[in-house]
Amino acid sequence: MDWTGEISDKLGETICARIPPIWGDLLSMSSVEIDRSSGLVFLWCVCEKISMSIVLVTGSAGLIGSESVRFFCEKGFTVVGVDNNMRESFFGEGASTVWNRDRLQEKYGDQYIHHNSDIRDRQAISDLFASYNSEIRLIIHTAAQPSHDWAARDPFTDFTVNANGTLNLLEQTRQHCPEAVFIFCSTNKVYGDTPNQLPLVELDRRWEIEASHPFYQGIDESMSIDHCKHSLFGASKVAADVLVQEYGRYFGLKTACFRGGCLTGPSHSGTELHGFLSYLMKCTVTGTPYKVYGYKGKQVRDNIHSYDLVNAFYHFYQSPRIAETYNIGGGRESNCSMLEAIAQCEEIAEKTLNWEYQESNRSGDHIWWIGNLSRFKSHYPEWELTYRVPDILKEIYSQNVDRW
């Protein structure tokens, strides 16, 4: 039977419509009529307001934001996205996320509602939250200025985006949907350059830490965020991170800070200043010169695929806690040095990367970062990584080679 029918959007109006049975619990029905000739069931009913489950995603056309849109749309949520393509303002035309936004709108139609708003605009954000109120079940805040170097050029913009924008979102959550879950994409840069004080050992292609060291399985949340150089980007993210925790502890909101290592995946609009694996593969494919900054190219990063991170968000959403902080990334299962990543990109693309080495490292940059995922796994033991660095690089290549 073809149940594709239409229902008037005028609440309280008595109408006749063909509807799927699953809608039965959403309607107050006064009578049922069966048209024997057509085999259709007509329900005379009074429509009641259907309560939506809204997921609000900031930075919705970016790497983690767009992954969040896909993930939650596929699970049947309505997703409201906030993204004004400020990444292009930060890093130039090549970093534009418009292509990704258009792809989401084309695929999900009315299920994805896009707002070209600036998270610093208090009135716009207030109006947005007021329009959905308690229908908002989850906020995933990924919008940010993400570069050390860019922050030093314009500290005011960096801080207002990263700190003030986060404050706007937290306060509107408290005012309009205090029962919602608030997830913040923080960063391992909240620990500043403290990881660089670890006793590292130089190997042939990477820096490493002794197997006997307490942090061999990764740096956990016990590392201090004080008495270190953060970079101005790191400082603005610390401010946001602490605000998210405080809205949990002070107001009782269900908040979490996910302090990520390198976040990556095929939807990343990688540039020289941000997007390690994506930009590295792009340069390998296109022949664009690439620069390696300091540490002999042996600096190590753990890398987590955007899907695995958003799946972690989903686990937290299903069983939220208050004012949590989690180091999240590829951990011991998915990490690489710069030299190792270059070799893998060249093997996958079957091309030689045109790269040069500069002795000076970026200020505040980490020599070695592998995060310890034990805290999150202890709270959500069913979550696990599904991608490793080689898988990620192959997917970045296959899904972008034609676009580049």
Image (spheres, grey):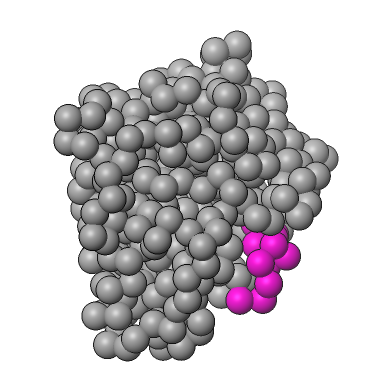
Where residue 136 sits, quadrant-wise, is top right
Judge by depth and name the residue closer to the eye, 331 or 46: 331
Say above or below: 217 vs 276: above
Residue 164 placement, left or right of 351? right
Where residue 176 sits, quadrant-wise, is top right
Say above or below: 35 vs 357: above
Asked whether residue 45 is in view, the answer is: no
Residue 4 placement, left or right of 332? right
Judge by depth and name the residue closer to the eye, 166 or 51: 166
Judge by depth and name the residue closer to the eye, 6 or 175: 175
Point 43% across, 42% down: residue: 260
The picture places residue 62, in percent across and down from the top left corner, at 54, 60
Secondary structure mostly seen in magenta is helix
Point 42% across, 34% down: residue: 197
The picture places residue 394, in percent across and down from the top left corner, at 27, 73
Say above or below: 76 vs 351: above
Point 56% across, 68% down: residue: 272
Find out whether residue 173 is within the magenta segment: no
Find out whether residue 92 is within the magenta segment: yes
Magenta range is 83-94
The picture places residue 375, in percent across and down from the top left corner, at 29, 26
The picture places residue 128, in percent across and down from the top left corner, at 71, 43
Asked whether residue 163 is in view, the answer is: yes
Point 68% across, 56% down: residue: 150
Judge by depth and name the residue closer to the eye, 308 or 178: 308
